[in-house]
Amino acid sequence: MANPPASKATRRTQQPASKQITSSAAKQTSANLKSAPKRKAGDENAPVDDTTASPTAENSKRRKEALANTNPRSGEGGPDRGDDGDVAIADQYAAMKAALEKAERRNRELQQQLNEAAPTRDHEETDLMEKPKGSGWNIQIAMGLRGKGTNRDKYKAIQLPVFDSKRAIRDLALNAGIEWEVSWRDVPSSKKAMLYDVCRERHPYLARFKNDWATEAIVKQYLGNKRQRAYDMGWLEPPEKYAYLKVNASKRNSTSSRKSKALVDASSTRKPRRKTSQTKSKRRPVNDEDEPLRFPSSSESGSGDNEGNEDSDAGDDEDAGR
């Protein structure tokens, strides 16, 4: 028995699945095109609905978002890299702010030390003090700190660790790595410059001396005394150029003083006195011719006559006896 002819609905259901999907996609596309807003011709900058955007447009949008979230410091992209970049920038800003506050605090401390220094007369800028000439000058007096009281305390605070051991020049010289076993001329210039800078910072009063001659004089005095003490105690061997001093000391008599020895040496080397000339010794004193004459008085003349008579009588008696 022959089958009856199929209707349209039956034929539609009996079509292959691929044809059914193709037809449904075509209908959906046509429906979307009808519902999409129409753009004017030539308007390329008109916004496009995201619902109808193509996969290519979505990919480009995602790429732009990824580039926007890329960390410029690390160079790595990704949506999660933005937070790390913000944290790094915040840390850097905090470190810079802390360094700035530290520098400002240090500046205030230095300004306070400068204000505490001895003010200049009539608030005028004073010229740098020159180094005294010669070698027989006193450091304290040359620095303008003569006398006792405040001046002496200020000088001792610079020289000795009286109030603060970290500010005394003696400790600063040793902390700067200056070797006290060698002479001052053998110390490197870099260490001297570093010491001068630190001393001016700790003691603003030392900044008024030209070429830091006051600082140099105090340090040289301290190192020289320390070296001499080591020579005397035998802890340090003196240089060869000072060997003659040791020889002279060995020849010196320790029982007598240097003054008495000097007198003996002077008497032995004293030249003999010159003899007086014979002509000078033969000279005799001459009486003055202008000396007034003295005449005897009458009483003196009478007594003289009697004495003459007695002599004459004595003479007559002698003649009679003969």
Image: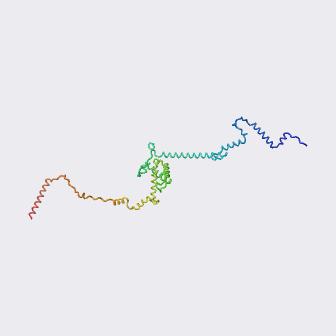
The answer to which of 270 and 316 lies nearer the viewer is 270
**At which x and y percent is residue 278?**
25, 59
The image quadrant that residue 318 belongs to is: bottom left
Quadrant where the N terminus sits is top right
**At which x and y percent is residue 113?**
49, 46
The answer to which of 262 and 121 lies nearer the viewer is 262
The answer to which of 269 and 234 lies nearer the viewer is 269
Above or below for 44 versus 279: above
**At which x and y percent is residue 184?**
46, 54
The answer to which of 306 and 173 lies nearer the viewer is 173
**Colour scheme employed for the rendering of this structure:** rainbow
Residue furthest to the front in view is 42
Quadrant where the C terminus sits is bottom left
Residue furthest to the right in view is 1
**At which x and y percent is residue 129?**
44, 47
Q: Is residue 218 left or right of residue 19?
A: left
